Image (tube, rainbow, N blue to C red):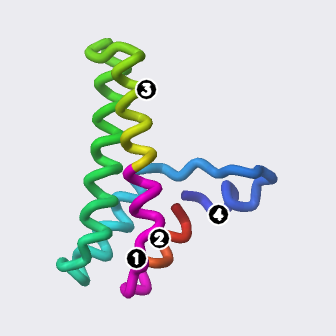
Amino acid sequence: MPIKQLKAPAEVFQLCLAHQLRDLQRILDSSPQELWAKAAQKLFRDAIHLRNRFASGEMKLSGFLRRVTQIENHLDRLLEEELKNEAARKLQNRF
């Protein structure tokens, strides 16, 4: 994500999931046992897949919204976990 995006005046920033997947992979490359990073990576991939299914017309709005709520709830639980890995903690704080 370009630094300019973080300097823009806004209350909420959108993070590119592809970049977050890359950052999570860096953690997994150095600490393959990091379960939090694996779970976050899977969740983000699920979110991308969900968006693609909805955009293609494969999924109805009601199903899409139900899955979005499930993904949000799962992310909330991941963000509440206490992490020992410093790099994972930094990403968790960013998310």
- Seen at 42% across and 50% down, the residue is 17
- Seen at 43% across and 26% down, the residue is 65
For badge 4, the amino acid type reads Ile
Mark before the other along the chain sequence, 1 or 4: 4
Q: Are marks 2 and 1 in contact (CB under 8 Å)?
A: yes
The numbered dot on residue 15 is none
Q: Badge 3 is on which residue?
A: 65
How far is mark 4 from mark 2, CA to CA? 16 Å
Q: Is residue 16 magenta?
A: no
- Seen at 33% across and 59% down, the residue is 40
Q: Is residue 80 magenta?
A: yes
Count of labels shown?
4
Mark before the other along the chain sequence, 2 or 3: 3
For badge 3, the amino acid type reads Leu
Magenta-colored segment: predominant secondary structure: helix
Q: Badge 2 is on which residue?
A: 91
Q: Badge 4 is on which residue?
A: 3
How far is mark 3 from mark 4, CA to CA? 31 Å
- Seen at 47% across and 67% down, the residue is 80
How far is mark 2 from mark 1, CA to CA? 5 Å
Mark before the other along the chain sequence, 3 or 4: 4
Label 1, secondary structure: give it. Answer: helix
Q: Are marks 4 and 2 in contact (CB under 8 Å)?
A: no
Q: Badge 1 is on which residue?
A: 88
Mark before the other along the chain sequence, 3 or 1: 3
Q: In the displayed structure, would residue 82 be above or below residue 51?
A: below
Residue 6, image quadrant: bottom right
